[in-house]
Amino acid sequence: MAPAPLRWVPLLLIWWGLAAPLNAQFGQPSEYRTPSCDQYKLPGCPRDFSPVCGSDMVTYPNECTLCMKIREDGRDIKVTQSGPC
């Protein structure tokens, strides 16, 4: 018979196999998209109103303002949807 700690390995592997899909399901959804911040090089943003919802649950007036927030805070904010949150 295997030592006690080794007996748990198969159970842990089974648990991990079941838990990994749940993590993907309840983590950040894959349909969130990365904003295209490379196109916004100006010190300011255009005033066009095309709201986007960030993964921080803040509605930004447009994608450029979301990119400015990312640059200021250094956080990884994704676009969850076009339009307000």
Image: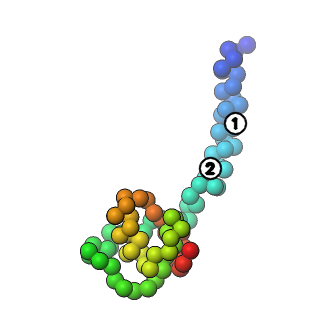
Tag 2, which secondary structure? helix
Seen in the image, is 40 located left or right of residue 1? left
Q: Residue at x 37, y 75 (%)?
A: 64
Q: Which residue is mark 1?
A: 14
Q: Which image quarter: residue 11?
A: top right
Callout 2 amino acid:
Asn
Q: Are marks 2 and 1 in contact (CB under 8 Å)?
A: no
Q: Residue furthest right?
A: 1
User: In front here: 7 or 48?
Assistant: 48
User: In the figure, 22 relative to 60: above or below?
Assistant: above
Q: Which image quarter: residue 48?
A: bottom left
Q: Residue at x 32, y 73 (%)?
A: 39
Q: Which disc, if any, is residue 82?
A: none
Q: Residue at x 50, y 75 (%)?
A: 59
Q: Which residue is mark 2?
A: 23
Q: Residue at x 31, y 74 (%)?
A: 40
Residue 74 in the image: state x and y as whole percent: 37, 58
Seen in the image, is 1 located left or right of residue 52? right
Callout 1 amino acid:
Ile
Q: Which image quarter: residue 76?
A: bottom left
User: In front here: 40 or 45?
Assistant: 45
